[in-house]
Amino acid sequence: MNRSFHPPRRILMGPGPSDVHPRVLEALARPTIGHLDPAFVELMGEIKTLLQHAFQTKNAMTFPVSGPGTAGMESCFANLVEPGDTVIVCRNGYFGHRMQAMALRCGAEVVTVDAPWGRALDPHNLDDELAKHPAIRLVAFVHAETSTGVLSDAQALAEVARRHNCLTLVDAVTSFAGSPLDVDAWGLDAVYTGSQKCLSCIPGISPLTFSDRAVQAVRARKIPVQSWFMDLTEVEKYWGEGKPGYHHTAPINSLYALHVALLMLQKEGLEPAWARHRLHHEALRAGLESLGMTFIVPEAERTPQLNAVSVPEGVNEAKVRRRLLDEHGLEIGGGLGDFAGQIWRIGLMGYSSRAENILKCIEALEAVLQEEGVDIAAGRAVDEAERVLAEAPLV
Amino acid sequence: MNRSFHPPRRILMGPGPSDVHPRVLEALARPTIGHLDPAFVELMGEIKTLLQHAFQTKNAMTFPVSGPGTAGMESCFANLVEPGDTVIVCRNGYFGHRMQAMALRCGAEVVTVDAPWGRALDPHNLDDELAKHPAIRLVAFVHAETSTGVLSDAQALAEVARRHNCLTLVDAVTSFAGSPLDVDAWGLDAVYTGSQKCLSCIPGISPLTFSDRAVQAVRARKIPVQSWFMDLTEVEKYWGEGKPGYHHTAPINSLYALHVALLMLQKEGLEPAWARHRLHHEALRAGLESLGMTFIVPEAERTPQLNAVSVPEGVNEAKVRRRLLDEHGLEIGGGLGDFAGQIWRIGLMGYSSRAENILKCIEALEAVLQEEGVDIAAGRAVDEAERVLAEAPLV
């Protein structure tokens, strides 16, 4: 064992990470400087401003957590839950269940509002449950469920929660930069995301934003946050207003990368980025349906950047994924939890969301499925996808 | 705000991060692949083996935490402390105090064993305290205190702890790869470190190792670990034996970098790496003493890779550091906690620990201190440092 690792060529069309833009990788490799260097502190300010833009918020407490999305999720729960609190966690997939697990670890009593895996959360069900529990002050839900490709109506859910005087804790890992997300207009209170999905940055960073209401709730706690690392009143000594003090050593190079990824998003514009993800979803969808595949999520409830389709009957799904990887350099995702072994998750996120990747994916799937004995008319699926792309008002 | 960030040229001789080797930066920027890609899983295996070598351990549970050293510290406490446990935390600097804060957040009663800031921990004091508290089962201490440059005798402290049937929880952030550290021979149980010190990797990763005794203690817990993200029985679904399952999205690119940094350490060899840090400390010390500076730590208790010296009387320490940064591109550290404003911390860690940096640092300090009105004989300090380097049996 004495050789440096050279990763094989891959096109990342799973549920994340997505392909990282070459400019982001180039920035990542710039020389490391100190986490309290005045030049770095200036960069931190720009990152906060760019994140506010991407989240569409004026929240002062908007910064990247120095860990993966899972650490971002836990940062939200650890700060907003006190032992003995009763909270509502909505569950319609794997990450809703993870939210419940985290809330329990924080000492909460958890009331769940469920929708079937593959369906959006129903604001009326949330309303009913909140009416039964007037003391509840926190509602947690996932905007785009990475396990199923479902997009729930975050605005409607937040409106219900606010009417019941609750804060909202929202997973925007897969929706951020790929689907409309308007933190301030929708009145969301604690929102976290990941760097490695529609932002196309390297994995390991979790941007979050807390509304003033949420910050007040943290400051009003009776019991200290159980995690010293995640306690936002500690973290803000570094990321908050004014001259930063020491809390932990920030992941300097990853933040160079985040900065460039956010600059590129700003340059593209949020609406064009959402439109691109939507268009490419339409093209991929035309191709996948032409291959005989069916989406597991009703059309109105799909998140465009993550396409969940049923594995065709009689097909060994793990073998197909392995062949796509080995023979075509293409990564797609399998199912999680209830859907393990039953679905594929095909991501079109960030820099991976490009016309050439859609065609490549359809061609590769067609070839492998044919060889695995599925009856498919050659070439038609690519034609269908190309037709959608050609008719689009923009690319 | 629309320009990519180009960091200014710096030589990092503070308490960390240290300069990152160009080969590590180059590996960092290789294309991202999936965290469950078979090629990446193979890399994970190599990283675990290389970490076992660097920690000098056969511990199966040896892997990098996906967060900074602070997350590594908290991972150790969160897993080994159950609410209501009484534990001993030794304190002789800032990070011992942080350990206490974390233990308290985990619900521990904390008994402290103190040494003055700038002095090593005394195993006899630990022995006495353990004799008074026979129910205690965990002793936490810092090997090399980054806040003061003190190296305590981890082997002697662990021997005392083991005699009292206690597990040890050890901060090896600054000692790892810079000073002798032999996890198995010394019988240490839970040890964490950082990527950004003597390993000269980018910041944001925290390797840790748990002995079988420590793993058994985690498995025997009555109350689940309060952090889902840090719960090692969850994390090992990804990093443990066998085919990895999903826990969180690993920081892929940072792990490419860690792998190369560990390969370079293996190639240099642990003993040569320690000898290099020791030699360069001797050279820097000769120069600093020739500049009239005094070390705050008695000679036998110094950690060679971090040199803590008193700020000369009448000198504005923050101004000197700022001038070193702005005029010489040189970062050194100020004091923390009890030593804020009173000391400088000059690191010679990893790739920063090179002869040219020692001379550059001494020249720059001499120039700035002279301009700030300190009476120094020009050129003598560099001669002293060069003499030590020239007489050395190795470089």
Image (cartoon, coloured by chain):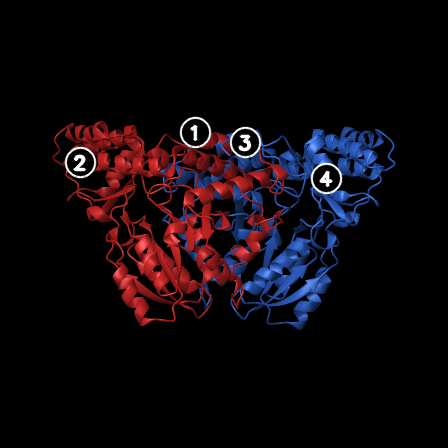
Chain colours: A blue, B red
In this view, B334 is above or below B156 = above
Front residue of A8 and B50: B50
Q: CA distance from mark 1 to mark 4?
A: 36 Å
Residue ID at (41%, 51%): B184
Q: Give the image location of residue B181, x and y in percent.
A: 36, 47
Q: What residue does disc 2 label?
A: B372
Tell me the subunit letter for badge 3.
B
Quadrant assignment, res B188: bottom left
Helix, strand or loop at mark 3: loop
Q: Is residue B371 left or right of residue B127?
A: left
Q: What residue does disc 4 label?
A: A321
Helix, strand or loop at mark 1: helix
Q: Which mark is residue B22?
A: 1
Q: CA distance from mark 4 to mark 3?
A: 23 Å
* Amino acid bearing label 3: Arg
Q: CA distance from mark 3 to mark 1?
A: 13 Å
* Amino acid bearing label 1: Pro
Q: What residue does disc 3 label?
A: B30
Front residue of A242 and B26: B26
Q: CA distance from mark 1 to mark 2?
A: 35 Å
Could you confirm whether marks 2 and 3 are on the same chain?
Answer: yes
Q: Which is more foreground, mark 2 or mark 3? A: 3
* Amino acid bearing label 4: Arg
